[in-house]
Structure formats: C-alpha cells, structure tokens
C-alpha cells in the first residue's frame, strides 16, 4: 500500500504543469526623487523587473491579467501643519514589452492632491508597488490551469524631501 501511495505521488508531480514560480519574482525599488516648484509635484524615479509569461503550445494558453493590469504605483504621504499632503501615480505598462527579466526604469510625477496641502521640504513616506500577473490555461483540462501573481512592494520608506 505504501509503495502505491509513493508511486501515485510521483505520478502527480510529473503530471502537473511546470510552474515558473522558480524564476525570480517581480521586484520594485525606489530610485531618486526631488520636489519641483513649491511642493505641488515630486518627481520619482523607480525601477522594476518582472518575468515574461511562459511560451506554451496548444491546448495551453497564457495571457496577462486576468485580475489586475500590469502596473507600477507610487504613493507619497507627508504631515504638513496638522494635515496630510498626499498624492499617487499609477503607471500601466505593456508586459509583453517590459516583462523580460531585465531591470526597467521609469519616472513618475506625484502631484499633491488639491484637497490637501502641498508637499514641503522635510520627512515624507513613500511606497512603490508593482503588479504583473498572468494565467496559464489548459483548454483540454481546465483543472490544470493556474495563475502566477508577480507582485512586490518596497513598503513605506521614510525619505527627506529637499527644496
């Protein structure tokens, strides 16, 4: 009986599709940043790397999505005179061109939300996040389909904004 269980477990392992989870997952990082004008805009340089979706043959199909569009999001928060200056920018990108395993660099402008104060010189908190999910579907056996979530965040980082 034990021999049958071991043989069945090995057969299941070899029957499952090869996952790309062994590849380096998505990574994001914060580059340089500087305040522009009187704190209305902060320009942020960020980097990211994501893996391509696998090349598969029929009956398999791979596609980007399905639950999130590939994006980089930069969020900025700062305490200013008992109020919070805040802003964020979301950049949607074409993963077939940029998810190639190579480091990519982008620049995003973070505008201070007009419902709050502008940013000022001093301490602020910033977070960079990235998403590039894909799914692999077997048209002959939907139960073998799977999704790979490539996601990363720097978490909130304390920075010093200058004039």
Image: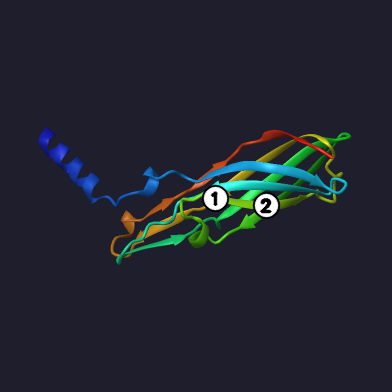
Q: Is residue 14 visible?
A: yes
On the rendered structure, is 91 left or right of 56?
Answer: right
In x, y percent, where is residue 139? 32, 65
**Res 53 → quadrant:** bottom left
89 above or below 29?
Answer: below
Estimate the spatial distance between the alpha carbons at disc 2 and disc 1, rounded to whole Å.
17 Å
Judging from the image, the colouring scheme is rainbow
Neighbourhood count class around disc 1 (C-alpha, 10 Å): few under 14, some 14–19, many 20 upward: many
Residue at point 54%, 62% (across, down): 94
127 above or below 63?
Answer: above
On the rendered structure, is 30 left or right of 39?
Answer: left
58 above or below 71?
Answer: below
Question: Residue beneath label 2, please?
Answer: 107
Seen from the viewer's position, the closer of residues 66 and 121 is 121
In x, y percent, where is residue 133? 48, 53
Question: Residue beneath label 1, please?
Answer: 131
In x, y percent, where is residue 32? 69, 42
């Amino acid at each position: 009986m034990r021999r049958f269980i071991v043989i069945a477990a090995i057969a299941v392992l070899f029957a499952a599709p090869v996952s790309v989870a062994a590849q380096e997952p998505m990574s994001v990082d914060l580059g340089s940043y500087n305040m522009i004008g009187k704190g209305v805009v902060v320009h942020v340089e960020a980097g990211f790397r994501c893996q391509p979706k696998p090349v598969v043959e029929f009956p398999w199909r791979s596609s980007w999505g399905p639950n999130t569009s590939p994006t980089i999001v930069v969020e900025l928060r700062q305490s200013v005179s008992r109020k919070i200056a805040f802003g964020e920018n979301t950049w949607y990108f074409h993963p077939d061109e940029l998810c190639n395993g190579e480091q990519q660099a982008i620049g995003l402008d973070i505008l201070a939300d007009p419902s709050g104060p502008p940013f000022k010189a001093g301490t602020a908190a910033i977070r960079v996040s990235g998403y590039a999910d894909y799914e692999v579907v077997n048209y002959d056996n939907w139960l073998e389909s799977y999704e790979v979530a490539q996601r990363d965040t720097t978490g909130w980082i304390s920075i010093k904004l200058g004039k």
